[in-house]
Image (cartoon, rainbow, N blue to C red):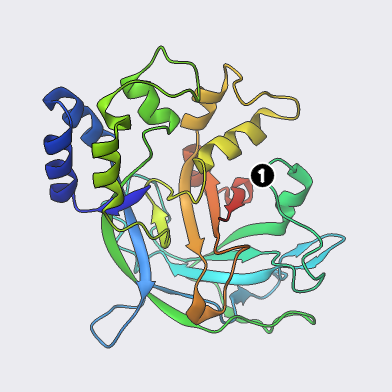
Amino acid sequence: MTHGTTAAFRDLAQQHLPADAAERWMELLRPGVRLEAAVGTGDAVIGRLGGLPPLPAGVEWPTWEGHGPLSFVASVDCAALPADGLDIALPADGTLLFFYFDGQVDDGDALVLADDPESQAGARVLHVAADADAVERPAPPGLSAYPVVNLTARPTMTATEPWHPRTQRAFAPRAAFGEAYDHPVCKEPFLDAIWDFDGDVGHQIGGHAHAVQNPVEMEVAHAALGDGAAWDDERMPDEVERWVLLAQFDSEDSADMMWGDCGALYWMIRPEDLAARRFDRAAFTWQCG
């Protein structure tokens, strides 16, 4: 939903929530790393949007079979990322590469959707080891590389929506999944104060995803439960808990990136798959306004 400092969030919670609720809400915050355009020599470059991906020999450019090659979105240097404060087990080194089928080769005919398992091949995450002999690979025919925007990192704390399943479980465990509940975290004064924080979706590693619409974990959890699962399936709350944000990438004018109508791309992963470096099991979804 938003991001800020621990102190600022604590002040907000203590001002608008009862003391016990304020402490419980603070426990729901998660650390993340915001990725912002590097400006000047004072900003350490930890990754970039666009450009060409460094791929080892023998590693093919990701392709969605029957549709075409994926566009390269971003790279993140794991060793340069200030990941000590994160609560997800990122690799200590190497580079994460993010690819997405953005419609360049088919005029936007095919879409990558969370609820369409076959389309998940249209979004990929690769981890290139630090000792791999990787060189930038030219884009396949039909693709134009996005302009390069160097990224720097800003550690932050992140808060999620009051209607997020994790928040609902904390404050209204008996409420039906996805239903509104009566609690100060859902009242206008608290919501208005939260929205006064930086509301940009932005680019981010770890933490709570900043959804454009509904919590992205719900989309991924619903898809993971399989075809035919209802949105109010009794398994949904537990399945939501099984997913964490790996990365999100917002629309970015300076990189000529526009995901739908000013939308954002999200890669989610189960903690056990992240710890085992099974990035092929990451789930993808996207949202736009």
Question: Residue 72: x, y in percent?
Answer: 62, 72
Give the position of the C terminus as an image quadrant: bottom right
Q: Residues within 10 Å of mark 1 (few under 14, many from 20)?
A: many
Question: Residue 188: x, y in percent?
Answer: 29, 36
**For this rendering, which residue is in front, 280 or 186?**
186
Question: Residue 141: x, y in percent?
Answer: 79, 82
Q: Residue at x 54, y 53 (%)?
A: 266
**For this rendering, which residue is in front, 128 or 252?**
252
Q: On the image, numbered disc 1 is attached to which residue?
A: 114
Q: Which residue is drawn at 73% across and 54% down?
A: 121
Q: How many labels does the image show?
A: 1
Q: Which residue is drawn at 56% across and 24% down?
A: 236
Q: Is residue 179 above or below residue 121?
A: above
| SS class, disc 1 | loop
Q: In this view, does 253 lie above or below 26?
A: below
In-image side of 182 versus 242 (left or right): left
In-image side of 11 versus 156 (left or right): left
Q: In this view, does 186 lie above or below 108?
A: above
Direction front: furthest residue: 188
Direction bottom: furthest residue: 40
Residue 143 figure quarter: bottom right
Q: Which residue is drawn at 71% across and 50% down?
A: 120
Question: Residue 70: x, y in percent?
Answer: 71, 67
Q: What residue type is labelled 1?
A: Ala
In-image side of 261 versus 62 (left or right): left
**For this rendering, which residue is in front, 46 or 144?**
144
